[in-house]
Amino acid sequence: MKRIAVLTSGGDCSGMNATIRAVVRSGLSNNLEVIGIQKGYQGLIDQQYELLTTKSVSGKLQVGGTFLQSARCLEMLEEPGRRRAVETLQEMGAEGLVVIGGDGSHRGAYELQKRGVPVIAIPASIDNDIPFTDMSLGVDTALNNILHAVDCLKDTASSHDRTFVVETMGRDCGYLALVSGIACGAEYALIPESAYDIDEICKHLLRRFQEGRDNSIIMVAEGAGKAQDIADQIKNRIGFETRIMVLGHYQRGGSPSSFDRLLAARFGVTAVEALLQGTSGIMLGLGCGAIIQTDLGKVIVGGRRKIDATLLKLAATLGI
Ligand code: ADP
């Protein structure tokens, strides 16, 4: 094997750059050339790519996002686009491909693998909803971003007797809201996986107020409701001044945490080793602290990763 390629696809997250760097450095250590494909699968359709060197990845480790850029590529959903992607890889002489992205990107990787491309996928998504890995790349940094924002908010909430509803990303997965709720000491974490009763929440907030505790933080996962709707319902029911903070894309950016940098290094190096060993069609993951491999065919039908029941119990015990 002489040459491999790497791309980042789908929603970006912190740690993607660190992973590209690990793939490049590990590739070069093993006498491989590494080609960086720009804008995800779109770069394979448009033939946009470049040879990566240690200089290309210098200064990128600590930067969020992806310098190769990411994009949604509709052509990959149809046969001609998939064929063109394979042809581009053949023309550039790439004998293996590392795909860093979320579940959609893994479907693309699976399609390429079915057409003979040796592929290793790396789970990257702040939602932590990719199955067969305890953590995806970018989750830990997103959690730290949320905690920083909520800690700032708590200072002002306590100065003005306010209730704040904080909306996190996560599509239909409440992981970010639940874990940040535990870690920042929120009163509630409203997640799509568990039903909630707004009347009960209001009664509880009122009780807290009567006990002299007049500021509260309610985390809400985007799949469980809109922060503004929840704030309006609280205001309408019990008259509390309720403000909102929708964290949106702020959660995705920023310098990767030490956890994500280490995970990026382990994923990147293992991906190159796997290709060199002739492994293909797998997604790397973190399982009980070790880097594990799961067949992509299994991953793409694996559905969304479920929230660990022990986390739900932990939150309940802590009164969240
Ligand atoms: P993410 O990877 O973050 O889940 P998307 O779902 O948007 O993001 O997927 C990223 C890209 O992966 C898509 O724009 C498309 O190019 C490719 N992709 C998604 N689903 C498929 C599929 N079924 N077949 C081939 N490529 C796919």
Image: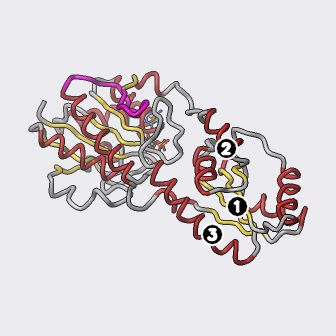
Q: Indicate whether residue 242 is drawn in magenta.
A: no
Image quadrant for the N terminus?
top left
Q: CA distance from mark 2 to mark 1?
A: 14 Å
Q: Which residues are magenta?
A: 277-292
Between circles 2 and 3, the one closer to the viewer is: 2
Residue corresponding to mark 2: 315
Give the image location of residue 122, x and y in percent. 37, 37
Give the image location of residue 141, x and y in percent. 45, 54
Give the image location of residue 186, x and y in percent. 67, 56
Q: Please identify the residue farthest to the bottom as the structure is shown.
A: 159
Of mark 2 and mark 3, the one earlier in the sequence is 3
The secondary structure type at the circle numbered 1 is strand
Task: State left or right for residue 255 relative to residue 185.
Answer: left
Q: Indicate whether residue 283 is drawn in magenta.
A: yes
Residue 310 in sight here: yes
Q: Amino acid at mark 2?
A: Ala
Residue corresponding to mark 3: 153
